[in-house]
Amino acid sequence: MAELWEPTLTQVAGYVPWLTVSRSDPGAQSWLGTFSEDTTPNAVQAGQHITDAASLVAPRIGTIAATLYPTAATVTALLAAASLARAYRRGPEDLTTAAALENRATALLDSLVDSADDLPGSPNPLVPVLYAPDPVPWGDCLL
């Protein structure tokens, strides 16, 4: 299920632009700025990484206000970009970049979760719900 706040292919490509080089003109080394059928990974593969990243973010934030959609999209884009950088790495420096993207996403996700919890009307999962059974009428006799 696509989330309303999922990032676009272009947003993710902004974090890993070297993966948007055209396969039909690789010598040019010009970045297309998005994923397409002419890039490796292609649009379908990049889209799957975005969906996977969103499936990691969604349980942490639950239902959020529309004002937080851009932040959720950024977190998801960073996680998807980190995943793409690992999956389609050119060398060890791409693994370092992936780790940096993931660290940034994790910090931003923690901030997003806090922001979502602080909004008015947001359910706070950290507040306990206390329940006790009704007292029995003869309970005072047991004291």
Image (tube, rainbow, N blue to C red):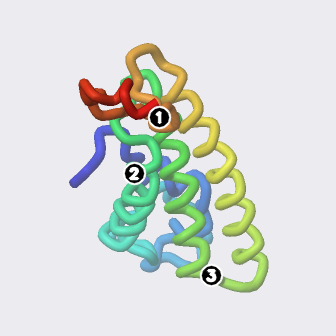
Q: Residue at x 43, y 78 (%)?
A: 24
Specify the amino acid type for callout 3. Arg
For the residues labelled 2 and 1, the Cα–Cα distance comes to: 19 Å
Q: How far across and how far down the image is residue 129, in percent? A: 41, 32
Compare residues 143 and 114 and report the one nearer the observer.
Answer: 143
Give the position of the N terminus as an image quadrant: bottom left
Q: Residues within 10 Å of mark 1 (few under 14, many from 20)?
A: few
Amino acid bearing label 2? Pro
Comparing marks 1 and 3, which lies closer to the viewer? 1
Whether pointer 1 and pointer 3 mark residues with C-beta atoms closer than 8 Å, the reply is: no
In the drawing, what numbered circle is on residue 59?
Answer: 2
Please give the residue where the numbered disc 1 appears in the rendered image: 128
Is residue 137 found left or right of 26 in the rendered image?
left
Q: Nearer the viewer, residue 88 or 3?
A: 3
Mark positioned earlier in the residue sequence (1 or 3): 3
* Residue that lies at the very extreme toward the left in this rendered image: 1
Q: Label 3, on which residue? A: 89
> Is residue 60 left or right of 94 when viewed as pictured?
left
Amino acid carrying label 1: it is Pro
Look at discs 2 and 3 and give the one toward the viewer.
Answer: 2
Q: Nearer the viewer, mark 2 or mark 1?
A: 1
Residue 131 appearing in the image = yes
Work out how far the residue at label 1 is from the one at label 3, CA to CA, in angstroms: 45 Å
**SS state under label 2:** helix
Give me the C-alpha separation between circle 2 and circle 3.
Answer: 28 Å
User: Where is residue 12 shown, x and y percent of the image?
Assistant: 50, 54
